[in-house]
């Protein structure tokens, strides 16, 4: 489909996605595996591998949601169309928490692993970002227009970018990196 190659969640609260595996899913626009909009969602202990969307979120595209993501793995996901965002995840609006996750070998033009923009708060903790690639900005994580950001106890290894910030890019954001 156009959005959410495996799952679409729209205008829903209290959605739990747990212990699932998403392999080789495709969407023609965004959210190779999952597309979330206007919802409250918990994603726990899931595996996302080899998913693809050309525009936004090779594995997951999130718009105007509150999302808690924990204990999940993202490997070889791509969002590689011209101007693509978030090889594994792209997020815009409301709040996102990412804890104890692994991001390896994901690729996008902006935010090789994760793209987070225009939200109230973002917390990324206890996670590994390794060998992710961006064509222009932020090999691992790109934050834009985010009001409150916490990045703590994360490991960044061999993330690459052609232009700016191999690890993290903060643009018009308020951040705390520990």
Image (cartoon, rainbow, N blue to C red):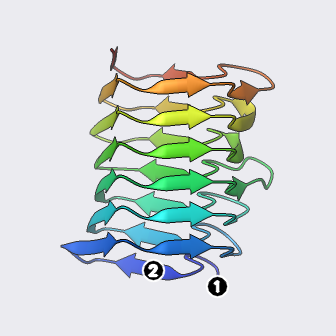
Circle 1 residues within 10 Å: few <14, some 14–19, many ≥20: some
Question: Is residue 30 shown left or right of residue 66?
Answer: right
Circle 2 residues within 10 Å: few <14, some 14–19, many ≥20: some
Q: Nearer the viewer, residue 133 or 56?
A: 133
- Which dot marks residue 21? none
Q: Compared with residue 28, is residue 1 higher up or lower down, i.e. above or below?
A: below
**On the image, numbered disc 1 is attached to which residue?**
1
Question: Is residue 83 shown left or right of residue 62?
Answer: right
Q: Circles 2 and 1: CB distance less than 8 Å? A: yes
Q: Quadrant of the C terminus?
A: top left
Report which quarter residue 16 is drawn in: bottom left
Question: Is residue 90 shown left or right of residue 71?
Answer: right
Q: Compared with residue 128, is residue 107 higher up or lower down, i.e. above or below?
A: below
Residue 40 percent across, percent down from the top left: 24, 65
Q: Compared with residue 134, is residue 44 higher up or lower down, i.e. above or below?
A: below
Q: Nearer the viewer, residue 51 or 165?
A: 51
* Residue name at image x 70 percent, y 54 percent: 76
* Residue name at image x 28 percent, y 77 percent: 11
Residue 84 percent across, percent down from the top left: 70, 50
Find the distance from the CA under tag 2 to the CA under tag 1: 10 Å
Q: Quadrant of the N terminus?
A: bottom right
């Amino acid at each position: 489909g156009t959005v959410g190659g495996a799952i679409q969640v729209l205008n829903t609260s209290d959605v739990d996605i747990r212990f699932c595996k998403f392999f080789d899913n495709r969407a023609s626009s965004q959210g190779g595996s999952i597309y979330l909009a206007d919802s409250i969602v918990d994603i726990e202990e899931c595996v996302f591998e080899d998913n693809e969307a050309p525009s936004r979120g090779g594995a997951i595209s999130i718009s105007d949601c509150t999302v808690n993501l924990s204990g999940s793995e993202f490997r070889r996901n791509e969002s590689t169309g011209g101007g693509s965002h978030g090889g594994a995840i792209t997020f815009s609006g409301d709040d996102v928490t990412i804890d104890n996750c692994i991001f390896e070998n994901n690729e996008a033009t902006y935010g090789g692993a994760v793209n987070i923009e225009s939200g109230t708060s973002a917390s990324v903790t206890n996670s590994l970002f390794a060998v992710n690639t961006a064509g222009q900005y932020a090999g691992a994580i790109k934050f834009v227009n985010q009001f409150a950001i916490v990045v703590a106890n994360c490991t960044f290894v061999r993330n690459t970018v052609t232009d700016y910030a191999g690890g993290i890019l903060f643009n018009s954001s308020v951040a705390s990196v520990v």
